[in-house]
Image (cartoon, coloured by chain):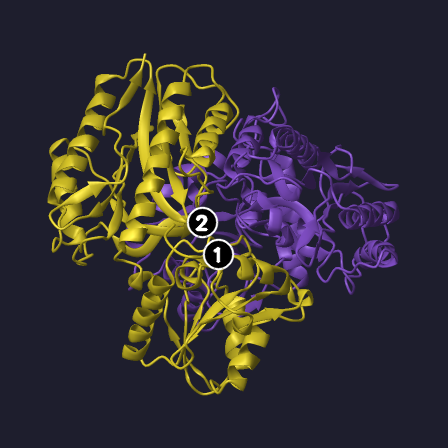
Chain colours: A yellow, B purple
Amino acid sequence: MLNDNDTLPFAREEYAERLKRTRMVMQERQLDALVITEPANMFYLTGYDAWSFYVPQAVIVDLTEDLPVWFGREQDGNCARATTFLPESQLFLYSDDHVQAADRHPMQLLGTWLKDRGYASRHIGVEMGAFYYTARAHAELVRALPDARFQDAELLVNWVRAVKSPAEIRYLKEAGEIAERMMSRAVSVAAPGVRECDLVAEIYHAQMKGTEAFGGVYSTSQPHIGAGRRANSPHLTWRDTPLGNDAPINMEFAGCRFRYHGPIGRTIYLGRPPQRYLDLAAAVIEGLESALATVRPGVTCEDVEAAWRATVSRWGFTKNSRAGYSIGIGYPPTWGERTMSLRPGDRTALQANMAFHLMPAIWVGDTGVTITQSFHVTESGYEPLTRLPRELIVKN
Amino acid sequence: MLNDNDTLPFAREEYAERLKRTRMVMQERQLDALVITEPANMFYLTGYDAWSFYVPQAVIVDLTEDLPVWFGREQDGNCARATTFLPESQLFLYSDDHVQAADRHPMQLLGTWLKDRGYASRHIGVEMGAFYYTARAHAELVRALPDARFQDAELLVNWVRAVKSPAEIRYLKEAGEIAERMMSRAVSVAAPGVRECDLVAEIYHAQMKGTEAFGGVYSTSQPHIGAGRRANSPHLTWRDTPLGNDAPINMEFAGCRFRYHGPIGRTIYLGRPPQRYLDLAAAVIEGLESALATVRPGVTCEDVEAAWRATVSRWGFTKNSRAGYSIGIGYPPTWGERTMSLRPGDRTALQANMAFHLMPAIWVGDTGVTITQSFHVTESGYEPLTRLPRELIVKN
């Protein structure tokens, strides 16, 4: 047990520390209140964990009250009671006639509530580009608080999340262990004639079963499967057609433990790959190794990418998309933290206990290779979250 | 085969008809262009189907061009080529340095593009409250087109989707058939001592395997599982603790076929339910039957709910949330269409080939019952999408 409450994945002190660091940034930015709508940030600050982000909800943090407030649908109040450490006084619930209604919106209630608490003309941070903070939600809040000064506080909490605690690293590793099992199952099942959907059934099964010691939960995203001629596309859904022979299957998915994600990508080639395809895989793997070799505190995100780029260039390949991104807590639609990207121009210096998915897949012409590595930064280098060999998996 | 293209779930004529009906509404509302960002609407109009909605993307419909334009990340261009009927001329791709970048945003490019096409001071519809149309996306588009007149066109396409074609009904039924198999598997596996995550592993497995004739794909949402004392909450995630004895398990999930959802909810009671719980279940089932008995074209959404409400009131129960909603195409985070709700005040008249999830779960105090029915409206009544008996499942 990490804590004295079986519903909380972290000790109360850790939540207090998170709030403290969030408030420090709020003070730096002269924010009086922060309206947090990104589900991952709500989970980070309060423990709230439910599939209710399809209706407006928020966590409100200010500088005066000790505890944040959870704002959401009345029906989901029990979800807040079950998963957060917040007492009843910190729950602000709205009635169901505000759900998906043309003539009213929950943010009108939140605006009035903020006004009543003295925020009518204060500085309020909102997450402008966050998932589920819609254009209408913002417009309603602004209309309800015409004298408030709104500031874009997108990623404020995401950046607070960047460096992980020991307990968070533990969950990331457990998520990685689940991802290994998912991939191992996929490798053992994939064969010509197996329907793509039946392969994916086994991947999901392994994901939820997890290990004997701990189970898995849903990850942010479907398993990305690109088989046969669809191996040239990153984000397609599987079909119910049988896997072909002499064709690659690109797979990218993640294990998830308490919303922490350990992603993995691998390519299985059914049959005998042509030399050109072997070269592509060799370039990706060599690039991956050269990028990983650079990882240590102080090195920048773009440095890691530069090592990758230099290596694959020597093989004659280029990639026009970023080579990776930071990871941690995730809710649909993505396990990326949306802060750091491994790409030119991102000069963020790596710190110990940051975590990344180095995802240098290449899609060229009519095919592609997906071999990736998630890791966390250590004092002297990195430690992988998944321990499967970085290789092209050939099944003859 | 429904069509001559193995990547398209519908005939080209059906897409043309959808576009035509969308443009009719645009003309009524004097909209010159429509920027569609809700993934379900993008899929409906173009076939686009990929897990790329975590970055800005859109389908643009105007009144002059024959075909819509797909706007998205360069990396996802192949997803558009694989899943839509659009020729290369209709793809407008943005480079990867616009992804999750502080200093630039894809909507700036879309704004310029619209300006170049003569929409600088025209009427442009946007989906203000749609998922993934963030406050920032809207702000950037407005900034790029300061003289345009924006109109909230949220739900415009959702309403066009309300009445289903025969091909859509077929997919809804196939989705329902998958949901039946998921539930049957859950019923056969659930037992005291089985870890919740292991139960869920079987549900996912059944979902993806589908039937011998067709496989399943991911649904919009995790299976909602509320076991034991968590049976009082609608949207929690399962845990890895073993199922207890003498306790209910509330389950709600959906099968999915070409993004069409057939949801189902059932409660399994492990052990012998107390009389009070049997009464609650009996009230829910009787309410469900009385609501279904009202369903036929011309009856309103609130009529259906009123029948439910009257019945459960006689048992002494109330429910503060809506009793159901319309369904069809779905992407995370919800399979609801967000148009019609079965609740007081919704006077929309039912029409043949509309589809609903009648979801009159009740959560009372420390427990709850989830027994639901999805259906489509027929000329004379309704036809269920799932054919499992509407009953409390007791496993002793």
Q: Position of residue A278 (x, y in %)?
A: 22, 21
Name the secondary structure under disc 2.
loop
Residue B104 visible somewhere in the drawing? no
A18 left or right of B297?
left
Read off the residue under disc 1: B132
In the rendered image, the quadrant that contains the C terminus of chain B is top right
Q: Residue at x 78, y 60 (%)?
A: B318
Residue A291: quarter of image? top left
Q: Residue at x 40, y 45 (%)?
A: A257
What amino acid type is highlighted by mark number 1? Tyr
Q: Position of residue B325 (x, y in %)?
A: 70, 52
Q: Residue at x 17, y 52 (%)?
A: A302
Foreground mark, 1 or 2, reads 2
Residue situated in front as seen by the camera: B321 or A276: B321
Q: Position of residue A22 (x, y in %)?
A: 33, 70
Residue situated in front as seen by the camera: B308 or B173: B308
Name the secondary structure under disc 1.
loop
Q: Is the residue A88 above or below the residue A340 in the image?
A: below
Q: Which mark is residue B268?
A: none
Numbered disc total = 2
Residue A164: quarter of image? bottom left
Q: Is the residue A275 above or below the residue A314 in the image?
A: above
Residue A221 visible somewhere in the drawing? yes
Subunit bearing disc 2: A
Callouts 1 and 2 close, C-beta under 8 Å:
yes
Read off the residue under disc 2: A333
A12 left or right of A74?
left
Subunit bearing disc 1: B
